[in-house]
Amino acid sequence: MSVEDGGPGQQVVRFQNEPLTDFSRAENRAAMEMALKEVRMGFGGDYPLIINGKLVETRSRITSRNPSKPKEIIGTISCATADHVDSAVEAARRAWEQWRKVPVDHRAEYLHLIADGMRSRRFELAAWMVFECGKPWEEADGDVAEAVDFCMYYAACIRELTKSLHCDFLGEENSVWYRSRGVAAVIAPWNFPLAILTGMTVAALVTGNTVVMKPAEQSSVVAAILMDIIQEAGLPNGAVNYLPGIGSEVGPPLVGHRGVNLIAFTGSREVGLEINRRAAESVSDEFGVKRVIAEMGGKNAIIVDEDADLDEAIQGILKSAFGYAGQKCSACSRVIVLKSVEEALLQRLKAATESLKVGPAENPAVDLGPVIDEDSIERIRDYIAIGNEEATPLVAVEPDSNGDKGYFVGPHIFTGVDPESRLAIHEIFGPVLCVLTARNLDHAFTLANETDYALTGGVYSRSPVTLQRAREEFLVGNLYLNRGITGAIVQRQPFGGFAFSGIGTKAGGPDYLLQFLLPVTVTENTSRRGFAPATKES
Ligand code: NAD
């Protein structure tokens, strides 16, 4: 144990991860096909806000489209304004008065009910994600499993956490316990439309807070289905309020509201920092300074050492760089390869990448679905143009015929990338990978750490010395050795970064819930003098 700031330590709670669906089984494929058919029949629905359990229609609306076929409208969603923020926060504050007094076990039971609701609608939920967010089947299924995991894991964690901590002394009783913080604004991204929104929401709930839930514009229908499941679980009105809207309009009044005590955000660095600043400049009525939990972006690297197993490395790079079209915060966007193996790696990586199939996410044979929207496709194409100008294109896969005018971008790889260029530094959030060449391992670790972010990273090497160096020198929140760098599993791999990748601790880890709580220490002098009757009239 020689990691510099302290060794391994993780509290394990009794909990089992939700298994993934095995789509090699015919009955599972049939169930998914059926769900896709049924969900498609439900397209075009209308999704109002839900404040204090009541539906609220608004004049302005968001139209959610299928990124594989933008002509297809998934649904239209009401769009909150600053006035709706006031009513939602007010509803959440009123609900908090009762909700915080609900015994911990009951609150945990509600999470089990939410998890059961998701299990019973598993294929349906995955199908909504395929259509609304362009998630390929397996990615969508993994998203549901992770959402269930968050419910079950945080329910288990809160029971551990609230076992009262006593450290008594002769004549003195000491206990440490936790208060809820109040109203939590949960602001989520579209790329894990169910799991991340669920994780932040149920963490707030189980710790006794109430929630104003602001999903991303692009995934507000999936969020509405989650809201339906939450309501089905029988939570009191106002405990969770569904407040979709345009982030730049509804976000600032929500974050700055005096009734909001805590902001749980996942999304881009730009918005996360803006939220952090706004929250610091505003105050909450009860507890003054607001708490901000912000999970942000990454510019993640995989190092390929001279003695790496290249077949394994290629598998890991492909999955990490191009899974869900590179639209994961954990995605690999930089490969750092030692000069002596560069040619061998790139030759095989090129062939493997060119074999990937790009197309509509509902087709299970597809490797890369679409990117999320028109803005994304433009941004990614701009970076590809920069790559063509400043670096050397190695792979440029064009999507197959695209009669549906879907937002498809094929995988792209650039070599000869300047480590200080925009391509090497900016989070592109699409299927664009750059290759940097390292003279030796020292250089490889320097390049890997030469970014503002610190989220995920990976090393392929057969040398125990290199792997140990990686543990000590590679500055990331989640380090993966000899495997891909995406797909963290709740409890097994608590997830989150530092630097410009995150403020706060890890989602799906033992200390996550602490961020939603106020710890209180009570010390009583028990060497009583005199006697007071056991009951007092108040
Ligand atoms: P985004 O920052 O554009 O939006 C995230 C949320 O913030 C949305 O709900 C949006 O409506 C809202 N928002 C926008 N402007 C706001 C404002 N001024 N005030 C308050 N809220 C505002 O991010 P995105 O495009 O939805 O998601 C992609 C980003 O999320 C990437 O950068 C990715 O790396 C990051 N991400 C990080 C993690 C992680 O765990 N670290 C996980 C998933 C995604």
Image (spheres, helix red, strand yellow):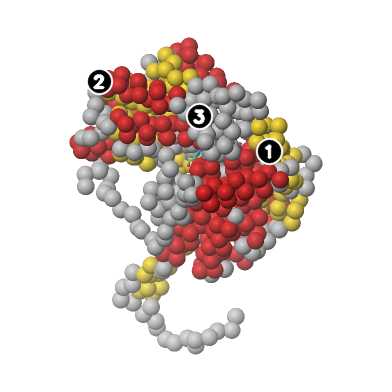
Position of residue 416 relative to residue 374, above or below, is above
Residue farthest along the right direction in this orientation: 59
Which of the 4 image quadrants contains residue 310?
top left
What x and y, as percent, mark residue 252? 63, 40
Q: Position of residue 111 (x, y in %)?
A: 54, 61
Q: What residue sits 52% from the left and 34% below the top?
A: 366
Q: Name which residue type carries label 2.
A: Ser
Estimate the x, y position of residue 290 in percent, counting from the top left: 54, 48
Does residue 81 lie above or below 112 as drawn?
above
The disc at residue 340 is 2
Q: Tell me which residue sits at (64%, 53%) in the image.
A: 227
In contact (CB < 8 Å): disc 2 and disc 1: no
Q: Which mark is residue 357?
A: 3
Q: Is residue 419 left or right of residue 380?
A: left
> What label does residue 372 carry, if any?
none
Can residue 255 be seen here? The reply is: no
Q: Residue at x 32, y 31 (%)?
A: 311
- Classify 10 Å Cα crowding around label 2: few (below 14), some (14-19), many (20 and above): some
* CB of mark 2 near ligand 1 (< 8 Å): no
Ligand 1 occupies quarter: top right
Horizontal and vertical percent for residue 268? 53, 35
Residue at which label 1 appears: 64
The tag earlier along the polypeptide, 2 or 3, is 2
Q: SS class of the residue under badge 3? A: loop
- The amino acid type found where label 1 is placed reads Ser
Secondary structure at badge 2 equals: helix
Camera sees residue 361: yes
Q: How far apart are marks 2 and 1 (CA)?
A: 48 Å
On-image quarter of the C terminus: bottom right
